[in-house]
Amino acid sequence: MEKYFVVRYEGPFGFIKPWTAVRDSETYSQQFLTPSIVAGMEKKLFPELLVQNGIFKIKGHRISYDQISGQQEQIQTRGWNSTRKGKEILFERPNGILIRGVMINPKLDLVFSSLDDAEKAYRQHVCLSRNEDVLLPIQIIETTKSDFDQNEELFTGFELVFEKTENSFLVGYHRLTLEPMYGWLKIVGNPINQY
């Protein structure tokens, strides 16, 4: 059986940035990690991988939380509007309000196939999408691939599996190659923690 080493992280809150506001209203993407988020975490934990595209050391992940708190965020449009006032031309960018979901008490499991990689990750913090949302390592759990996939009590959560199948949906575009990224959502146990 293939051994896995799971590093569990916890924090008081966490924000996952949706790749478009329209998409988030349809897929609720603020509940799962996209390939670019996981790749970013891996590059933070293992900076020697910065020169390579892709995900190499993180073999899987799972995220759960207590609840999502709606937070208002003020945004500005990308373009400028111009108006004339006498001889002057005035430029403005209209403001808008969006509601973003912030996870309360997120729990994140990152899976490694090497104990050395898990121990290196355990000595560092991670962030979801914002630097201020720090998740700290709590423990390393030794398990097997099948136990990680099936144990609903110990490894509950959402996991976006990064592959294109008939159940996959578009989850964003690769920031370097602009290729579409696909995945399907695996839900193990009850990802909304019971407190």
Image (cartoon, rainbow, N blue to C red):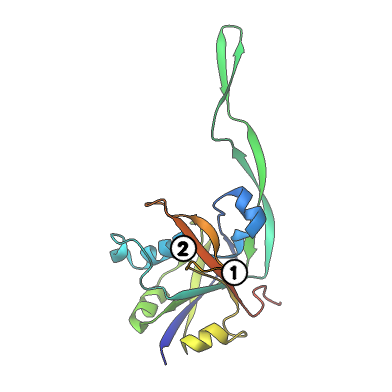
Residue lying at 67% horizontally and 70% vertically, measured from the top left: 66
157 or 121: nearer the eye? 157
Q: Quarter holding the C terminus?
A: bottom right
Which residue is denoted by mark 2 in the rendering?
Answer: 35
Say left or right for 178 vs 48: right
Residue 88 position, x and y percent, is 56, 11
9 or 186: nearer the eye? 186
Residue 17 position, x and y percent, is 55, 55
Q: Quarter holding the N terminus?
A: bottom left
Separation (CA) of disc 1 from disc 2: 18 Å
Task: Give amino acid for label 2.
Answer: Pro
Secondary structure, mark 1, is: loop
Q: Quick check: can you spot residue 43?
A: yes
102 vs 117: above or below: above
Q: Which mark is residue 106?
A: 1
Q: Nearer the viewer, mark 1 or mark 2?
A: 2
Q: Quick check: can you spot residue 130?
A: no
Residue 182 position, x and y percent, is 50, 62
Task: Give amino acid for label 1.
Answer: Pro
Residue lying at 66% horizontally and 54% vertically, measured from the top left: 25
